[in-house]
Amino acid sequence: MAGRTGAAAIVRCDWVSPDDELYVGYHDREWGVPLYDERALFELLCLEGAQAGLSWRTILARRDGYRAVFEGFDPDRVAGFDDDRLEAILQDPRIIRNRLKVFATRDNARATIDLRHEGGLSRLLWDVVGGKPIQNRWQSLDQTPVSTPESEAMSRMLRKRGFRFVGPTICYAFMQAAGLVDDHVVGCFRYGEVMEGARPLNSPA
């Protein structure tokens, strides 16, 4: 069940601790809001990959550090990092210092740039859900899947194009966060609201 918290008894998804301001803010303002911008999608995809084996809370608390060392997750800048630059990043305590994940960020930047010849990262990702978010109707967190046919298809397409740390489970967490699916539980005050930011695939921002 979704939990009630706050003076006005606001109902949120049950993965959100009412005492965790970082999680509350992320849930209320970001999680599930449809993203279309290449840079924002690239950042989130890399951060979801960095989460593998860890909690999202761990990565979220270091997000500013990641943004600093990867220059705002600008794909063009990150794609140009040489090995020495990545080795230096591995010494930075502001991020999780996992060699495979750090080097994968550069690979993902280069793959993102290559995708511009196919319409771009946003188009590839949103094509998986037919250009509009999937509205789910979960009553509680334990009903939410860890992967779906759509996340499996996304994983295959991304891997084929050179992306790393994009397994089906990572891709589904990404889809939830980036608003390709609305997985706010039905009782959550954000259920359905995030869909207000959705737009058809080919519409202007």
Image: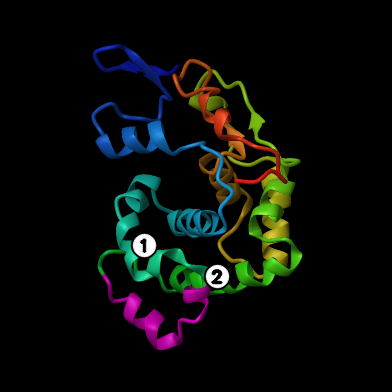
Q: CA distance from mark 1 to mark 2?
A: 14 Å
Q: Which residue is mark 1?
A: 67
Q: Residue furthest top?
A: 8
138 w.r.t. 116: above or below: above
88 w.r.t. 95: above or below: below
Q: What percent of the width, then of the height, locates residue 4?
A: 34, 15
Q: Is residue 89 magenta?
A: yes
Q: What percent of the width, then of the height, locates residue 204?
A: 65, 46
Q: Secondary structure of the magenta portion, mostly? A: helix
Label 2 environment density (alpha carbons within 10 Å; few <14, some 14–19, many ≥20)? many
- Region rendered in magenta: 76-92
Q: What percent of the width, then of the height, locates residue 90?
A: 34, 75
| 54 to the left or right of 155 | left
125 w.r.t. 71: above or below: above
Determine which of the numbered discs, if any, sits on residue 109 in the image.
2
| 7 to the left or right of 86 | left
Front-most of residues 182 and 2: 182
